[in-house]
Amino acid sequence: MSMILTHAVLAGVVAEVSSAEVLSFDVFDTILLRRPVGERERLWRAARQIEQRSGGRVDARSYYMVRQQAQRLGYRMVDVAGGTGDIRFNDMLSRVVALLGLPADVATLCRDAELEVENASLSLNQTLAEDMRTAKAAGKRLIAVSDTAWSSADLAALIEPRLGKGIIDRFYSSADEGLTKRGGGLFVRVLSEEQRPASAFLHIGDDRLADVDQARRAGLHAFLARPAQTHQLTRRTRYLSLAMSGFLLTRRRMRQGSAIEFTSRADIGQRVFGPIVAELCSRLWLYLSYQPAVGTAALFCARGGLTIGVMLERFLVRTGLPLEVRRAQFMISRIAALRVAFVCDGRSAQLEMSREFHGHTCGQVGQALSGLPCGDDPGWAAAFEYKRFRSLLTKTTQGRRAMAEIAAQAGHTDQHLHQASGGAKRVVLCDTGLYGSTGRFLKEGMPAVTIQSLLAARCDYKHLGRDHFGYTTGLLTEANGYAPWDVRSSILRYWQLFEQFCESDLESVRSYQTGADGKVVSNLEVPGWEDRLVPTGDSILSGIMAYLNQLEPADLGALPGKAEEAWCTLHNAILNPRPEHIELLGIHNRSVDFGGDKIIPVITALDPARTLGEKMRSVQTSLWREGAITSQFPNFRFLLLPAMNGLYGLRALTRRTSEMAGHSSSTRLVRGLVRSAARRMGLQLGSQLPGKRV
């Protein structure tokens, strides 16, 4: 249980741990208290100062957006790595400056401005400071240990002018040490450097995991301190004010984007998806640039990931951004990855198969996994059930033959990954999205390899668990559904559009074979397959490539703003489509692509003379429901689309509330009312996104 840090409390703790020779303190919200200014507001203040001091060379909003992503993806990489390392502030700023197309020396200006704003937002914890001085006078050794991107010298510059020099004997920064408290490694390093037994330490901090749990695991005495702060409500209010300002700016850009006219699919690709894909490539570069160049491989997964890889390489060539991580194409699919988890009887395989093969027979499932007919034994005609299916694989002749082929194909997948990665022990799977099943299967079936999934977007639409989200990152959005305040989440309302232009006209990977040279080759790799990754004719992808082909390093600074405008335009086209959008953004029907040939319509086509009920059902069965409304009810779309979007907004609000406060009875009531209203409109607010490969 945490306690407010007072003289009496601290004195009691120190007295209780009489063996403590070294007093160790967390820095932020322990030694130094933050004024009621949130992190985003501090960053925005720094961005405005940087714009002024640079004479306008640095655009404040562009810096603000890129800097946020550089921090998010940097710390995300640290979390995925298990908290064993950390990012350095200077390294992060060097990436920000590079992504803005600015000279390297601008990073010093940015650092100075951010450190100045950081310093102005801090105040000394006077209660703790007095006790620290008393402890120092009593002969105790005092150290500061912090998980931060600031260096030890920066920590000293923030603390010593307030506390006094010589009070703290040494500063330990996770950025300098390359280890974190949250991962536990920083405490081990401290014990090694201080050359004292763990029982001689008392650590005090405000984070239960980093400052208490991990400290105690390392053998230190630890105390969870909650500083007496009265500005929490003020800080949250200021944060909401800043967020609202950003939301209103986005809404203004949405209104501007709604007036844009397009002449062709290539035109949409160049003017809308071009900046969006450039943003995706910049974030992809950010994440991969944080990875160690040695021992890491980025594998671009068939089929959508192959196109992302092509777009990234073009982006790097045009902008001149360096990237040392090994990059290669990886022929994979969900069904191919599933075999790897299935062979080891992984739980992820069981969950996915129970979902995807519901309503199928065991024979159909056996053929989907092995490619061999299964059906002579009567048991194969029974409805699929996981335990029944595994029993058939071991007890029937056809089953044993199918299992042998499944195992052989799983072995080919393992061998192919090893060949593509060059034997790297850290593999980053780059793909479109959304759930990250491929990475989940491979991680469970290949424990010797550290698997990370890097997706264009991440969304929990399957509800089969989020255990793999710890190593699955969404670059454009990580929302679990559309939210009106998150313009990038609008792509989730029509995700199939993004996948369609990423996936070239190639077969899904279903099987492998080993060539004479020992290289594993998939069925996708037919003669001339690489040429089919290059777009031709009037297509969204051809427009995207045209945009990337004209990029220059000098364009990088304006890219964040252009991407924001493009997202607003796309949001309008998806959520409030006009009839001309149906023709330009409409795509072919989508395959479920899981070892079968099931097709789901993007917009269910109907004869205009059909009944109202049939038209409403066509909206329900369409993947792009807003497009279906515009197609089926062109005269009433002005009423139906806002009503449906309002329901989705309310649903997003209840989802956000439940995530923050748990599933309370009031939240369930509101959610039930939203679903009831949707049903009365003939809509189903499901979160599943079928007809796609994830």
Image (tube, grey):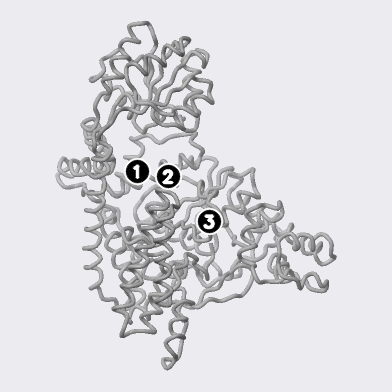
Secondary structure category for the residue under label 2:
helix
Asked which quadrant contains residue 39, the reply is: top left
First in sequence, mark 1 or 3: give its number: 1
- Residue behind mark 3: 436
Asked which quadrant contains residue 147, the reply is: top left
Q: How far separated are the C-alphas under marks 2 and 1?
A: 8 Å
Q: Amino acid at mark 1?
A: Arg
Q: Amino acid at mark 3?
A: Gly
- Residue behind mark 2: 289
Secondary structure category for the residue under label 3:
loop
Q: Nearer the viewer, mark 1 or mark 3?
A: 3
> In terms of depth relative to the viewer, which is nearer, 506 or 484?
484
The correct choice, above or below, for 567 with respect to 197 in the image is below
Q: Amino acid at mark 2?
A: Ser
Crowd tier of the residue under label 1, counting other residues whose Cα lies within 10 Å: few below 14, some 14–19, many 20 or above: many
Q: Nearer the viewer, mark 3 or mark 2?
A: 3
